[in-house]
Structure formats: structure tokens, C-alpha cells
Amino acid sequence: MPDIAWEDPSCAEGNNCFRLGTDPDGNAYIAVNGQEQHAISDSLAALRTLILDIKAGKADHLL
């Protein structure tokens, strides 16, 4: 696995903690805290779009 710089976990209620990270090549990673070896990755632009879409309510139907 590449050298990933992980942010501190972002946690909701209970044990729902996620971590975001980046590597030196500019890739972005999302993982469940403690399960970083199973991260999903994409470009920083894709992660930015995902976060902005979630903030805009485009995933509200999943709640």
C-alpha cells in the first residue's frame, strides 16, 4: 500500500468513524477507522466532487 497521510478520524454517534487520506501521487483515500488496509481510492477531484455532492444533499435519500 502506498504511503498514505491519514487525517484524524471523523466520527458520528457510536463507532461510525471514517478517515480520509492522501498519498504523494495526489490520490485520495476513504477508509473505516481501523480498517485502513481496505481503503477505497480515487483522485482528489473525485473525492472533492463526492463531498460537495453529499453536502448539497444528493445522498439524502440514503439516510
Image (cartoon, helix red, strand yellow):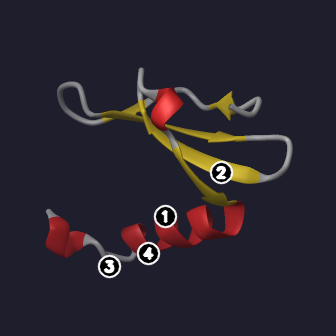
Which of pointers 1 and 3 lies earlier in the amino acid sequence?
1
Q: Residue at x 69, y 60 (%)?
A: 44
Q: Amino acid at mark 2?
A: Ala
- Residue underneath mark 2: 28
Task: Report the number of numbered marks.
Answer: 4
The residue identified by callout 3 is: 58
In the structure shown, which secondary structural element does the residue marked by tag 2 occupy?
strand
Q: Which residue is mark 1?
A: 51
Provide the secondary structure element on which disc 3 rests: loop
Question: Quick one: SS at disc 4?
Answer: helix
Are the residues at dot 1 and dot 2 in contact (C-beta closer than 8 Å)?
Answer: no
Q: Nearer the viewer, mark 1 or mark 2?
A: 2
Residue 42, horizontal then vertical, whole percent: 62, 59
Q: Quadrant of the C terminus?
A: bottom left
Marks 4 and 3 sit apart, C-alpha to C-alpha, by: 5 Å
Q: Nearer the viewer, mark 3 or mark 2?
A: 2
Drawn side of residue 29 relative to residue 36, left or right: right
Image point 50% across, 40% down: which residue? 39
